[in-house]
Image (tube, helix red, strand yellow):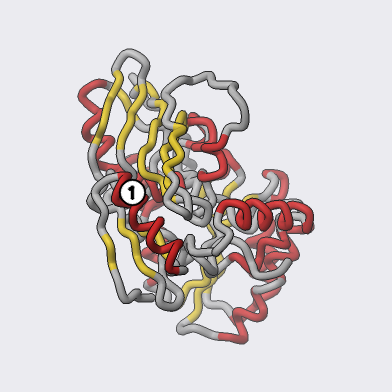
Amino acid sequence: GSGPVLLKPENTQQVSDILQYCNHKNLAVVPQGGKTGMVGGSVPVFDEIILSTMRMNNVIEVDKISGTLVCQPGCILQELEDLLDPDSFILPYDLGARGSCHIGGNISTNAGGIRLIRYGSLHGSVLGLETVLADGTILDCLSTCRKDNTGYDLKQLFIGSEGTLGIITKVAIALAQKPAARSVALIGCSDFDKVKNINEIWALRERVLEACQRDGYVFKYDVSLPLSVFYDIVNDLRSHLGSQAKNVGGYGHIGDGNLHLNVTCDEYNVELEKAIEPYIYDWIAKYKGSVSAEHGLGFIKRKNMKYSKSEAAYNTMKGIKQLMDPKGILNPYKTLPEKY
């Protein structure tokens, strides 16, 4: 997708001025960070104005006593890790796209990653947010307190809402102590010739998707399932598709029930897609899983919300969206489907 205008604000007031103007003129806005999303959440659909946070990349404070970080949303994850490393702190999450993803985008999509089982989700790690609402109002909930029980926890509305309720302009997040030691995984091999260095094995894990892409076209799914049936979906889908698919495989985060399911073929095949969907979503709904574990719904997956959320939940979300963005200018066509 592409937009007619790309804006690159440097601070909160500039974001506020932009949204106030766009709301008054009924101009739709798409917030954009590192552009590493998998579901088209930061991609313009029609002629939306693109608001990039790439220049909002300042670290405001690192409190070494309380173990907190305050920064702007355009800070790149890897650069924050490098900054924190000398003080033996780490961020409580990590992603394969760490070299280019922005912390604001991570929070807007409630990114999961490989540290979730140890430190929990961003709903717990994010201490405070400053956001700008659709009409330009600056909502300051930028607290670094680990306990704050004064009314509704408004920041939670913006974690995972993919920029549809407001644009994040500042972040306060709790840091974790850098581990003094790391545990080694137990990996079974048939002979010593197949034993690899643990770093080489992890590199293979992070390049699985790249390997799938060499197989041709890839249908990608990011799902959550109970551990009791975690991998059964791969075997069932493989049997269901038969020779229509080149390969069906799954990998991911078994500790938190998040499976990345990939189906490959030589080139895009509409008949294969019809065989996969809605079969895979009905399967997930049967076991009360989630059709989006950590990537969000964006534009591509929003129509599948009904498989994981009730109609009452959908209607409540629509009500919140209508209240906070009555003109619908913030990231339209994303997250919420037009109807249940």
Q: Nearer the viewer, residue 245 or 78?
A: 78
Tell me where residue 215 appears, x and y as whole percent: 42, 74
Residue 275 in the image: above or below residue 107:
below
Relative to 192, is 219 on the left or the right? right
Q: Which residue is drawn at 28% across and 25% down?
A: 62
Tell me where residue 276 appears, x and y as whole percent: 65, 74
Q: Which residue is drawn at 50% across and 79% down?
A: 265
Relative to 145, is 49 on the left or the right? left
Q: Answer whether residue 36 is visible to the viewer in this image.
A: no
Q: Give the quarter of the figure containing the N terminus.
A: bottom left
Q: Name the quadrant containing residue 303.
A: bottom right
- Looking at the rendered structure, the kind of residue marked 1 is His
Q: Name the quadrant containing residue 231.
A: bottom right
Q: Nearer the viewer, residue 66 or 77?
A: 66
Pointer 1: residues within 10 angstroms few (<14), some, or many (20+)? many
Residue 327 in the image: above or below residue 294:
below
Q: Give the quarter of the figure containing the C terminus.
A: bottom right
Quickly name the residue at label 1: 102
Q: Residue at x 49, y 20 (%)?
A: 146
Tell me where residue 46 appears, x and y as whole percent: 44, 78
Q: Which of 216 and 337 is in front in this view?
A: 337
- In the image as oriented, which residue stretches furthest toward the front? 24
Q: Answer whether residue 264 is visible to the viewer in this image.
A: yes
- In the image as oriented, which residue stretches furthest toward the top? 65
Relative to 265, is 274 on the left or the right? right
Residue 290 in the image: above or below residue 129:
below
Tell me where residue 257 appears, x and y as whole percent: 61, 45
